[in-house]
Image (spheres, grey):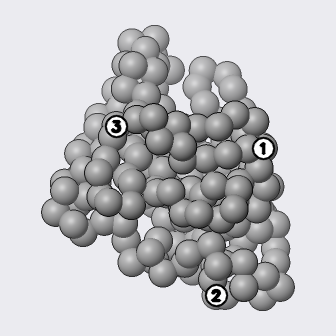
Amino acid sequence: MPEIEIHYHRPPNRMDIFVQDLVVDQDDCKVTLHENTPLTSELYIADRLIYEPGSPIVWFVFPGEWYDVGRFHLSDGTHTGYYVNLIAPPDLDRSTWTMYDLYLDLWVDLEGNHRVLDQDEFDEAVDNGWIDEVAAARARETLSQLIMKVEAGGWPPAVVRDYDLERVRGMRGRSRK
């Protein structure tokens, strides 16, 4: 499986580097597996555990789109829901991808309930000029569109439902184009 190095920028000056296995490389969607994520704390949303340290995440990147999606799991592989990062459209070079975080996130649980995350951080970033008005407006618009799709039952996209953890793990050693 080819490895992708992701340079994840969070304004004003934070950058994290993540290395993930590229499992699906299609023009309209890239799927990566982050088998042992480096996040060191449990994550809860509405008092519900959605992530444990070292748990796997299957990431879906859509070239040209203003978001990516993570299928979150617990350490035993239990799927907990979908974490959507609002980002500027990513630069997907062959083995190094560059992404710019727009702070806003959306959590969608397995029952289709959703919650907007980090609105306060987004507002602070806009107020401080870390995100320009054009990108901020596009992030708000994209978030609204995603929420409408969730509420209408038309989300997540089929590719996100189809490539579950078991399937992605089974694809190791071969990349699908």
Residue at 37% of width from left, 26% of height from top? 119
> Given this view, does label 3 or label 2 mark the residue nearer the observer?
3
Is mark 3 in CB contact (under 8 Å) with mark 2? no
Query: Where's residue 144, x and y in %?
Result: 23, 45
Which residue position holds label 3? 116
Crowding near the residue tagged with mark 3, few <14, some 14–19, many ≥20 C-alpha atoms within 10 Å: few
Position of residue 164 relative to residue 99, above or below, is below
- The reply to whether residue 169 is in sight is yes
Disc 1, SS: loop
The residue lying toward the viewer, choosing from 74 and 162, is 74
Q: Which residue is mark 2?
A: 177
Q: Residues within 10 Å of mark 1 (few under 14, many from 20)?
A: few
**Callout 1 amino acid:** Pro
Task: Mark 1 and mark 2 in contact? Answer it, CB < 8 Å.
Answer: no
> Residue, x 78% and y 88% (percent of image)?
174
Picture coordinates of residue 2, whole percent (x, y): 82, 74
Which amino acid does the dot numbered 2 rest on? Lys
Residue 52 x, y percent position in the rendering: 67, 46
Specify the amino acid type for callout 3: Val
Measure how far apart labels 1 and 2 are at the Cα level. 28 Å
Of the image marks 3 and 1, the number of the one nearer the N terminus? 1
Residue 19 appears at what percent x and percent y?
80, 55
Q: Are marks 3 and 1 in contact (CB under 8 Å)?
A: no
How far apart marks 3 and 1 lie (CA) works out to: 23 Å
Q: Say what secondary structure mark 2 lies in.
A: loop
Judging depth in this view, the residue of 177 and 109 nearest the camera is 109
What is the number of the mark on residue 38? 1
